[in-house]
Image: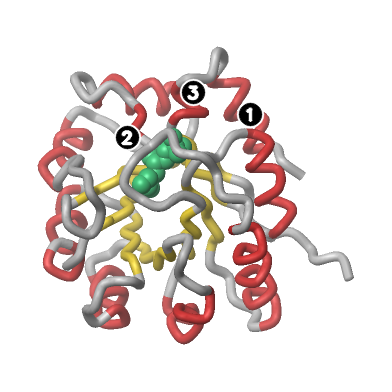
Amino acid sequence: MVTPVSSHPTILAPSLLAGDHANLAASAGSVEALGLKWLHVDIMDGHFVPNLTFGPATVAALRNAGNQMFFDTHLMLSEPHLYVEDFAKAGANLISIHIEPDYDHLATLTKIRELGCQCGIVLNPGTPADSILPLLEHVDLVLVMTVQPGFGGQSFQPAMIDKIAQLHQWRLEHNQNWRLEVDGGVDLDHARSCYAAGADTFVAGTAFYKAPDQANFAQKIQSLT
Ligand code: DX5
Ligand code: ZN
């Protein structure tokens, strides 16, 4: 059986993690200047993942600098429920939380929506798709990590393609409408494989910021068919 691809328009969300940390507003601004709508913002706590990045003040500063993009905010935090309000107030549009830490996932997803944001659930490479199935009727996006989170520039894990296909199949069978996003080591070839499995939303850090022609890279991803 040929599985139809997603009904969502394909979106590229460049990851600011691979931008210039001494000039994040410029790195975000260069993405917006290309006409792209989404910016992926990676928030790390040095606990759930072994690295530290930005906080709500950085997100607010990007907004205050005039950036109007859709901030796709990926919280890699052990206790995300303590921070979703801060990120919503700072200007996040979508807030994604991981399934692995122990907290009330459904209450946190509900809270994100009450704060006026879209909500997403994220799985690490070692986490099976089954672990999030009961939550899928409550989310706007599912993020499948294709590397172990914590650092940019890692190698894409092809074994995640099956998980993407499994989740896409569930989406079709249950007539659900969330976006299916992939994050980690995604270049054009990997984006093609993920797209064929049902992904519609592509995070790219290194591949985007290091591309010799970013506009061309973005155009190729967003015209995947
Ligand atoms: C990894 C982050 C990713 C990272 C992707 O923990 O969640 O968003 O920025 O970077 P690349 O595309 O370089 O793997
Ligand atoms: Zn991310």
**Side of 89 where 175 appears, left or right:** right
Q: Nearer the viewer, residue 108 or 151?
A: 151
Report the amino acid beneath label 3. Leu
Instruction: Look at the numbered disc 2 and say if its residue's Cβ is closer than 8 Å to ligand 1.
Output: yes
| Residue bearing the label numbered 3 | 34
- Ranked by sequence position, the earlier of labels 1 and 2 is 2
Residue beneath the point at 58% across and 29% down: 218
Instruction: Measure the C-alpha gap from mark 3 to mark 2.
Output: 18 Å
Q: Nearer the viewer, residue 65 or 170?
A: 170
Q: Tell me, yes or no, if residue 207 can be seen here.
A: yes
Instruction: Look at the numbered disc 1 and say if its residue's Cβ is closer than 8 Å to ligand 1.
Output: no
Residue 115 placed where, x, y %? 22, 67
Residue 222 placed where, x, y %? 63, 38
* Label 3 environment density (alpha carbons within 10 Å; few <14, some 14–19, many ≥20): few
Residue beneath the point at 60% across and 25% down: 217
| Residue bearing the label numbered 1 | 219
Instruction: Measure the C-alpha gap from mark 1 to mark 2.
Output: 21 Å
Q: Secondary structure at mark 3?
A: loop
Q: Quadrant of ligand 1?
A: top left
Residue 172 image-quadrant placement: bottom right
Residue beneath the point at 17% across and 50% down: 46
Residue 99 image-quadrant placement: bottom left
> Which disc number belongs to residue 17?
2
Q: Tell me, yes or no, if residue 70 can be seen here.
A: no
* Label 2 environment density (alpha carbons within 10 Å; few <14, some 14–19, many ≥20): many
Residue 202 placed where, x, y %? 54, 45
Circle 1 or circle 2, nearest the eye = 2
- Ranked by sequence position, the earlier of labels 3 and 2 is 2
State the residue lying farthest toward the top: 212
State the residue lying farthest toward the bottom: 134
**Side of 54 where 160 appears, left or right:** right
Q: Secondary structure at mark 1?
A: helix
